[in-house]
Image (tube, helix red, strand yellow):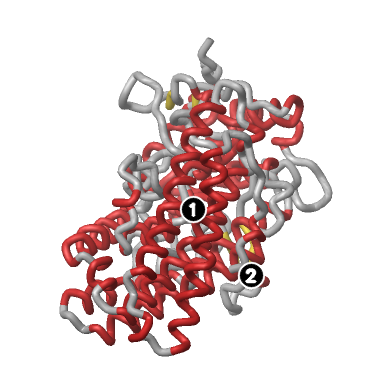
Amino acid sequence: MMRTAPKTFSRKFTTTGYRRLASAVNSSGISAAWTKTPNEFTVTSQTGFLPRHDPLPVLPSYFEKLEEILHEMPINKGDGTYGLLHSGRFGERIEHELPMYDVDFIFDSRILSALYRDYTFLASAYLLEPCDIQYRLARNYGLARRVLPANIAVPLKTIAGRINAKPFLEHSMSYTFYNYRRIDSAGELSVDNIEPIRRFSGCDTEKSYIVGHVAAAQQTGSMVEASLEILRSAQQNDRGAFNNALKQYTGAMSKVNGILSKTLKNTSEYASFRTFLSGCKDQPMFSNGVFYEGSTGTSMGERFLGVAQSSNPIASLSTHLFQLSQLSPRGTLPCANGVDSLRPVNYRAFLSHIDATSKMTNVQAYALHSSESSVEYMAALDQVLAYRYRQWANLRDSIPVQTASNKPAFREYFDVQTRHIRDVAELVQRTRSNIDAELLVPADRVRAESIVHRAEMIRRSLNRILVDSAETSLPISMIAY
């Protein structure tokens, strides 16, 4: 039976006089002139994939009740007390206390982005609360709620449409890159100076996951700059600039991997929040998708990939730039099957440009035409392998918690990802075999051999997993990056 809000819901909680209230919103330091401004998520060599401004940590006072529920939401609130998700009371609070906020008058990009973050958090928490409870009780997910109530669905659809986003929890706009605050507002965006704004579990692992991805994203500005220079120099046959740009990209990726290896090393509590990162597409807990109550559009359930099925845009950038998608024709890569379509609109434009230009220029062939460039290309792929292997290991750790109905499909997806990483490792080996070692300086010769040795370790390990259908467990630390 479809769950709906009480008949008195909209009359009781619809806000009135909102334009008058809007003009008075100054308590959190936000301008009262809510005029239309550019999207918060652009792609530049200064900010990379991070937003133009730091996220708004607190909503305007107009949304006081929404802010209060979000504060009470996490399983562990961080002050030694349990929140609504711990006791299974979150859905009840949403149905009876969350106002039907009117957001039609809001055009300020920072407020829209903050509202998108917060309403997508509400949506995932509401829909997946039963699954989280079921997992804690019996280590299976059961079924999610099918209907997103109008007090979440209607504002979320409006906000998502205004910023050209999907109305579901997303990696960059919701969970990580617009979900941090600086502890010292004048300090750097470092691991020690970042804390999440919103959380589901509230555990240390969830904090590390969010903080690590934000801190690592600081390096994406250098990666964006390097990727554009790689394409420009290849088009203009500027070999020296091409090699230097590859070195810059590799250096930035190395810093990304260094940050993530430190912040994501403890995955013991990952299951405490992973449930809420699930999408409503191709998931057994959402057999018919999600119905957005009170919104116009399809009468069928809507289906979206979630954070757990998506990835940091770094994976997509590397895949597009180095033409790695051609290694896996089945197309279930970080940039395939609709994943890129979930990202901020400016991400999509940038990644499409990188993909089209790389194919037109044939970056891979240009790199392999020179022994020195081939080594730099290998070094970049070495860091891509380190990044993708960490993602793969996280995916592998999810196998034991899959339900019986979902495990075969999940295993197939896992095997496709495994084959892709193995194929990248084999590309590294083929690149090395095409290099005339006599043309390399001794340092590059040693570096190439070290890279190909790591690639061979990965290739052999993943081949064993593909041959052996058992759920082989390999520690992340087995690859010494």
Comparing 444 with 233, the one in front is: 444
Q: Looking at the figure, which quarter contains the C terminus?
A: bottom right
Q: Position of residue 351 (x, y in %)?
A: 30, 58
Disc on the earlier residue, 2 or 1: 1
- Mark closer to the observer (2, 1): 2
Q: Which mark is residue 6?
A: none
- From what the image shows, is residue 429 above or below residue 251? above
Q: Which residue is mark 2?
A: 191
Say which residue appears at 68% left-offset and 41% top-offset: 271
Query: Based on the displayed image, in which of its 4 quarters is residue 45 positioned?
Result: bottom left
Comparing 52 with 378, the one in front is: 378
Say which residue appears at 40% left-offset and 89% top-offset: 441
C-beta proximity under 8 Å, tags 2 and 1: no
The disc labelled 2 sits on which kind of residue? Val
- From what the image shows, is residue 409 above or below residue 396? above
**260 on left or right of 147:** right
Whether residue 383 is visible to the viewer of this picture, yes or no, is: yes
Say which residue appears at 69% left-offset and 43% top-offset: 74
Q: Residues within 10 Å of mark 1 (few under 14, many from 20)?
A: many
Q: Residues within 10 Å of mark 2 (few under 14, many from 20)?
A: some
Q: Position of residue 428 (x, y in %)?
A: 41, 64
Q: Secondary structure at mark 1?
A: helix
Question: Which residue is most to the top?
Answer: 1
Query: Based on the displayed image, in which of its 4 quarters is residue 144 positioned?
Result: top right
Q: Secondary structure at mark 2?
A: helix
Question: Which residue is most to the right?
Answer: 80
- From what the image shows, is residue 131 above or below residue 103? above
Say which residue appears at 65% left-offset and 63% top-offset: 263
Q: Which residue is mark 1?
A: 114
The disc labelled 1 sits on which kind of residue? Ala
**423 on left or right of 25:** left
